[in-house]
Image (cartoon, grey):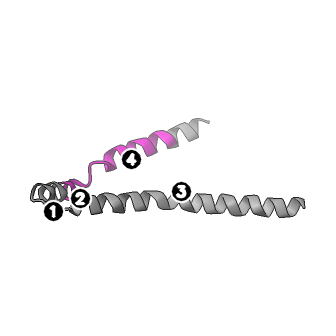
Amino acid sequence: MKQLALIILFLVNLFKQASAQCAMCKSVVESNIDGGSSIGSGLNDGILYLMAMPYLALAIVAFAWVRYNKRLKA
């Protein structure tokens, strides 16, 4: 149990440090938005697309697993 807690603590600290690594992207988007460009909305759409993919993959695997289990029971 202690090993799991240490791993979780390590991962939390790792992600805390990684959250500040995109200063260049942020500054480019902010300067383009101030100039009237719509590149920020495109970047946001891309982020949402990338965020949805793991959930979609998990849903497909769960659906296939449930369907497989129903076939085994029948």
Can you give x and y, in whole percent of width and height, for residue 52 in the image?
A: 47, 58
Q: Amino acid at mark 4?
A: Leu
Q: Secondary structure at mark 3?
A: helix
**Label 4 crowd bin: few (<14), some (14–19), many (20+), radius 10 Å:** few
Q: CA distance from mark 4 to mark 3?
A: 22 Å
Pick whichever of labels 2 and 3 is earlier in the sequence: 2
Where does the magenta region start and end? 8-26
Single out the mark in the foreground, 4 or 3: 3
In front: 22, or 40? 40
Question: Which residue is identified by label 2?
Answer: 40
Cα–Cα gap, marks 1 and 2: 8 Å
The location of residue 50, given as percent across then percent down, is: 42, 61
For the residues labelled 2 and 3, the Cα–Cα distance comes to 24 Å
**Which of pointers 4 and 1 lies earlier in the amino acid sequence?**
4
Disc marking residue 37: 1
Can you tell which mark lies on residue 14?
4
